[in-house]
Image (tube, rainbow, N blue to C red):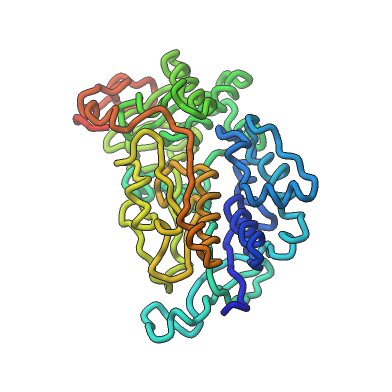
Amino acid sequence: MKQLPIAIIGAGPIGLAAAAHLLERGERPVVLEAGARVGATVLQWGHVRMFSPWEFNVDAACRSLLEAEGWLMPPVDELPTGAELVTRYLQPLANLRSMREVIRTSARVTAISRKQRDKLKEAGRWTAPFLLRLQMDDGREEALAARAVIDASGSWQQPNPLGADGIPALGEAQLSGRIAYGIPDVLGVAREQYAGKRVAVVGSGHSAINTLLDLLRLRDDAPATEVVWALRGSNMQPLYGGGTDDQLPARGQLGMRIKAAVEAGALEIAAPFPITRVAKVTNRLQLYSDNNWLRVDEVIVCTGARPDFNMMRELRLDIDPAVESARALAPLIDPNLHSCGSVPPHGEAELRQPERNFYIIGMKSYGRAPTFLLATGYEQARSITAALCGDWAAARDVQLHLPETGVCVTDYASECCDEPALLPLDVIPVGLEKLPVAAACC
């Protein structure tokens, strides 16, 4: 077993950090990336400027490797875009000889098991190596043996659906070609698709706010553009964040900017509007919320993402049934319970699975929780790699200081069913059928 590598799935910021920590300890990992280059997923939102500065976006072990080769750390208070994170940090890291030798691109992991043992097999399980099935771009398949596996593949490729029920809305699958998920570049390559159109943005997080603000900028050049924000609930205040109390100023400014736009009437608000069905009417899309409807030209779904566990079917996992993170981590990050934007330090102990020497880290480790920061993943990588190398003291010495959001979810809990919608459905502007609306909680 000691002759086998530690396999890392994903060559994004967290996967490369895990590799750097292992190299620092004299181990030889193998990094398996489905994309054609490192940071392939990050480049899908490369136009988006991050609200966390370089100070929080560079891992300590990666920085040591880079600086030994003459790399200069960008200004710590500068806010990079996703593309800059790749070109100024991840790609130079991958170009280092020590890293270049352990990274395999265009190698998608489709399944993980134990050699000659399915999930039910107990005898000899913990002495059997992991077996990873790889799919190459040219269609070839390979099997790779490993003594441990770190899954840092993220969840960006598994967006949550348009439907408010947690499953695709009726008609969503058939019309998926007309619906965008994530954060399309509405000011760049996707400009023509949205300029002069009536666009609905569905979602309440930072991705939705970024997209809405970009659409409002697009309208400055294309005045016929109409922007509609469709929300499940009606209480707007929690969506604006902590403002000046946020310890990441750029994150606080996002909330303040969208709040100013809403108060100025710069965009339409459809709230509460939990979407249950979508249909094509002539050449437009019609979104339904029970008996109410909203007709638009384009729909952008910014409702977050969820982890894909398909490749782990033959592994023994203990996943929280709601958050879909490791069970021990769930109460620390559950957005229904967690308040004040602070996440307690956590590492190997909280991420441990019943399948020995298998860990999920990074964005995927957070399941459906939306509060992940790169700094969290870097500390996860440091703690887990220390444990895999037998340094349990270092693994347990978890140090994590995250900038707080300046807002507590408990601030709004008592207002949930008392505060009226900002714009009740019966007075929402053009596009919604004016029908009676039942009382709803946020």
Quadrant placement of the C terminus? top left
Q: Position of residue 196 (x, y in %)?
A: 57, 25
Q: Position of residue 322 (x, y in %)?
A: 31, 52
Number of marks: 0
Task: Identify the residue at horizontal 66%, vertical 50% (top origin).
Answer: 62
Q: Is residue 81 left or right of residue 161?
A: right
Q: Is residue 69 left or right of residue 172?
A: right
Q: Position of residue 30 (x, y in %)?
A: 64, 67
Q: Position of residue 232 (x, y in %)?
A: 33, 35
Q: Is residue 16 left or right of residue 243?
A: right
Quadrant placement of the N terminus? bottom right
As displayed, is residue 85 above or below residue 330?
above
As displayed, is residue 420 above or below residue 365?
above
Task: Identify the residue at horizontal 37%, vertical 33% (top origin).
Answer: 340
Task: Identify the residue at horizontal 63%, vertical 55% (top origin).
Answer: 16
As displayed, is residue 115 above or below residue 340?
below
Judging depth in this view, the residue of 27 and 274 nearest the camera is: 27
Please tell me in which quadrant of the rendered image residue 120 appears: bottom left
Residue that extends furthest to the front in the rendered view of this protein: 393
Task: Identify the residue at horizontal 35%, vertical 41% (top origin).
Answer: 335
Q: Say whether residue 265 is visible.
A: yes
Q: Say whether residue 178 is visible.
A: no
Residue that extends furthest to the top in the rendered view of this protein: 264
